[in-house]
């Protein structure tokens, strides 16, 4: 009796497993497999693509998006992808070698499944004049940290929409409706956050890397300098001394640092100038509970306001 009972349990278990496997297959079937370079893009694609897409990001929000170490698992993901979506403007340049290694002609530059979300963007800081190695990790197409202006979700999702519409062979209404609904929600959120930050308009800040010009422009902050002397170049004593002088003169209140940078130099600067270090997140970071693009801005603005309140109380 006991044997029969165990046999029946085993049969049910294996049947359930088989059904789960089959269901996973059928849910995956017909969906567009999208691979993105960052978690921010992954969230925006989920929003537009809804149940018609499977999305996975190659990098985590906790990583510096300029330097992501290519892994064989990433090549496997790209091999199966119908679409690759990237920030472009030389930020996620590490994606190029991965696309090449995947030998997937559906996602190479110029293919239907290749989406660069910076197309059509109003770019900031396009360098003029001669560019050479002494300028640090200069981005020749302009500053690529454009997703940090939430308004740029319009351009990002427009590029995504175009790509998905082509891949789904017509019938883009589903994606268009998702996008329109989302942009309405996002617009309301941006307005609310701008309103919240209004009393602090014009606040002067210093940032570690030059990641925040789009963010600062949208939310009315003034960036007066960087902890890095040049993009990608670590701080040195003479640069720190000059920055401290400038910050005292300009009455800077805040130093914005991303979680993956060392706080050593910012701490020295903060103690010399009486400023406050604020760790802002440059990307959606599932592990930190920042699951969506909207969460990201809500988190950053609230963090900034808390720090500014503390500063004005002192
Ligand atoms: Zn950068």
Image (cartoon, grey):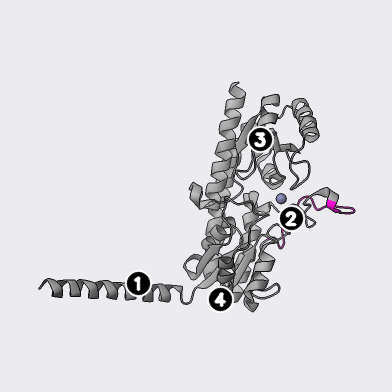
Q: Please check the rendered image and state whether residue 131 is part of the magenta-colored stretch, yes or no.
A: yes
**C-alpha separation, residue under disc 1 versus residue under disc 4:** 26 Å
Point 29% across, 72% down: residue: 16
- Asked if the residue at label 4 sits under 8 Å from ligand 1, the reply is no
Name the element at disc 2: loop
**C-alpha separation, residue under disc 3 versus residue under disc 1:** 50 Å
Name the element at disc 1: helix
Q: Is residue 22 above or below residue 259?
A: below
Label 2: few (<14), some (14–19) or many (≥20) C-alpha neighbours in 10 Å: few
Residue position marked by numbered label 1 in the rendering: 20
Residue position marked by numbered label 4 in the rendering: 168
Residue position marked by numbered label 2 in the rendering: 122
Q: Residue reaching furthest front?
A: 3
Q: Earlier in the sequence, mark 1 or mark 2?
A: 1
Image quarter of residue 89 = bottom right
Label 1: few (<14), some (14–19) or many (≥20) C-alpha neighbours in 10 Å: few
């Amino acid at each position: 009796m006991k044997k029969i009972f165990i046999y029946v349990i085993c049969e049910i278990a294996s049947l359930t497993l088989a059904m789960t496997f089959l269901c996973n297959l059928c849910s995956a079937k017909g969906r567009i497999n999208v691979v993105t370079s960052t978690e921010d893009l992954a969230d925006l694609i989920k929003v537009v693509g809804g149940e018609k897409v499977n999305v996975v990001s190659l990098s985590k929000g906790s990583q510096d998006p300029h330097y992501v170490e290519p892994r064989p698992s990433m090549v496997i993901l790209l091999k199966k992808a119908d679409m690759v979506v990237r920030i472009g403007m030389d930020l996620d340049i590490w994606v190029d070698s991965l696309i090449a290694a995947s030998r997937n002609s559906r996602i190479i530059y110029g293919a239907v499944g290749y989406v660069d979300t910076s197309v059509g963007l109003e770019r900031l800081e396009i360098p003029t004049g001669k560019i050479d190695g002494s300028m640090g990790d200069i981005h020749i197409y302009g500053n690529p940290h454009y997703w940090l202006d939430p308004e740029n979700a319009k351009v990002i999702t427009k590029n995504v929409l175009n790509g998905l519409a082509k891949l789904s062979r017509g019938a883009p209404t589903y994606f268009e409706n998702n996008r329109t609904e989302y942009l309405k929600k996002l617009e309301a959120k941006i307005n609310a956050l701008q309103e919240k930050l209004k009393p602090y308009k014009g606040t002067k800040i210093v940032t570690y890397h030059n990641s925040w010009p789009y963010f600062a422009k949208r939310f009315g902050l003034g960036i007066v300098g960087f902890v890095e002397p040049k993009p990608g170049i670590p701080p040195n004593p003479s640069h720190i001394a000059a920055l401290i002088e400038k910050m005292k003169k300009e009455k800077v209140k805040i130093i914005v640092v991303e979680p993956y940078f060392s706080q050593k130099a910012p701490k020295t600067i903060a103690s010399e100038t009486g400023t406050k270090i604020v760790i802002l997140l440059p990307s959606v970071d599932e592990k930190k509970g920042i699951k969506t693009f909207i969460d990201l801005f809500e988190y950053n603005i609230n963090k900034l306001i808390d720090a500014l309140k503390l500063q004005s109380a002192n």
